[in-house]
Amino acid sequence: MIADINRLIADKKASVFEIASEYIARINNNDHALHSFISYNFEDALLKAKELDGKLQRGEEKPLLGGIPMSVKDNISVKGMKMSCASKMLDDYYPPYTASAVDSLFKDGAILLGKNNMDEFGLGSTGETSYYGPTLNPLDIRRTAGGSSSGSACAVASGMAVYALCSDTGGSVRLPASYCGCVGFKPTYGAVSRYGLTAYASSFDQIGIISKSAEDAFAVFDTIAFEDPKDMTSHSVPQLSEFRLLNNDLKGIRVGVDWSYIDIADSDIKNAVCAFIDILKALGAKVSEIKLPSCDDVLASYYIIACAQLASNLSRYDGVRYGYRNKCCQSFDDMVTASRSEAFGDEVKKRIILGNMVLSKGYKDKYYANAINCRNNVIRHMHDVFSLADIVLTPTSPNKVPLLGAVRASIDDMYRMDIYTVLANLCSLPAISLPCGYDSEGMPIGVQIMSGEDTDRYLLHISDIIEKNIASGGGIYGK
Amino acid sequence: MINKEEISKIARLSRLEISEDSLASYADDIDALLEFSKINSKAYKTEEDAPAVSIDDLRCDNIACGEEVAPCDISKDASNGFYRIGEIS
């Protein structure tokens, strides 16, 4: 998609201004029904597009992402633009600085169209906990777009943005990408600076990308991945030239599959993933069975640690420094409690309470300490797995795309949606969700591929080869 | 089973007020979450295999600042810590 737009601009078939105008028209025509955006940036987008056209006319070279219309999840700072995290708490918060990842895209001339809807503070897997209402799936508006990056996936899938910058704490990039038929890439923890990303669970949070293809995700990743002095956990990851390059096939690639993971998925998903494995075999990959950590324990460990970190991170929203403040209270304590109680949604409150509960005396050893032990073991386990396999394959979601309202009724169903995705966050690994087919109701199915820490570019390279082979074979990408 | 009083107490400590009407449903949901969050495998509970990491261990001043690890260069050791990056992140 990015290459196609670049070709249009290079061949002078369309100006950057015309392309930006086209995307704005699409948003104006469709977003009132889909609720993909929380705020728009049209005036600035057109101004930047005009400036870039002027530079191109003067003979300046266009960077790869220059003039490409994109959107940003509403928990990533852009100076002067509202950043609500889809919460009443930050409904009128305007950050005083821009996130490092967004800044690097701006330096390349990216055209920001607006900020995307999401689950409140990223807490949810269906996009339904947003203060501004749920985003609808553009492929079937009775269904959720997934979450928490619901608006980002919807915008890319419906052609309202070429790609979206979003965040992934336990699957928030990959799950909505899977539900909307897009590519969702979560880099290695620290490969992209978190400076400017609103913290949910700091040891899991990672900025990621939703796009139409792995090739596009690669182009964006190349721009946003660097060591940032403003984020001490950031580091540079190896260039593609440091890996053994593949020649349009997967010869020599070792694919690890744990059938017990695939068996618990819906039968349509199981069939699609098995068919995908056959494609990898046909491309020359060597598929072998591996043993992944118990997915129930991985999920439990993730939720305990994530809620504990959430409770700590969200304690800063007290009505004093940021966001909503109840102005009727007589005392400071009452003001803090009233502000938080009125501005946070139910899901946020439940997870804060759970987080503080697992850290409290009497629960800490049973839950939190146990979860940290579990995490350390799972990390070691996955290290061993990647000595046997180059990539590990699982479905992205255990269930088909849910109808709106269907999942929220059951806590168990809601949290189980992340059963495949949290492993990569727990172990800081890169992971990508690629479309791999359609279910019996015509909705997309995603397959997740994980690789070893810091092998982001290799994972994107492999994904690109898989995509191009499937597309040339008239597979799902042709639909 | 978590009771309403316990939820109410932790909510207060979390600076949250939960109405009497909502307490029962919160207790049910949090109970389900705790049940859901039980780690069953004994393999994860061996001290020697997996030394416990506490929040105190992860504070910057508890990380070794010798030759191998520069002050505050804790990118590899910090994966469980709480960091405040920037003004709001």
Image: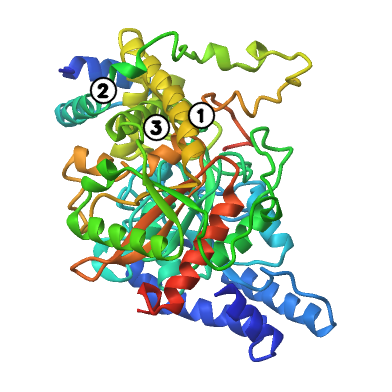
Quarter occupied by residue A46: bottom right
Chain holding disc 1: A
- The answer to whether residue A146 is above or below residue A293 is below
Q: Which mark is residue A277?
A: none
Q: Which amino acid type corresponds to the residue marked 2 in the rendered image?
A: Lys
Q: Earlier in the sequence, mark 1 or mark 3?
A: 1
Residue depicted at 23% across the width and 52% down the height = A399
Q: Which mark is residue A340?
A: 3
In terms of image quadrants, where is residue A409? top left
Q: Which residue is more in the foreground, A114 or A454?
A: A454
Residue type (three-letter) at the residue carrying disc 3:
Arg
x%, y% of residue A406?
A: 17, 52
Res A36 visible? no
Disc 3 is placed on an element classified as helix
Q: Residues within 10 Å of mark 3 (few under 14, many from 20)?
A: many
Q: Amino acid at mark 1?
A: Arg
Q: Which residue is mark 1?
A: A316
Measure the C-alpha gap from mark 1 to mark 2: 28 Å
Q: At 65% across and 53% down in the image, what residue appears? A: A224
Residue A159 visible? The answer is yes
Tag 2 residue: B38
Q: Quadrant of the N terminus of chain A?
A: bottom right
Q: In this view, which residue lies farthest toward the bottom?
A: A13
Mark 1 or 2, which is nearer the eye? 2
**Which of the two residues, A264 or A117, is positioned nearer the viewer here?**
A264
- Which residue does the image show at 65% across and 83% down from the upper left? A7
Q: Is residue A187 above or below residue A115?
A: above
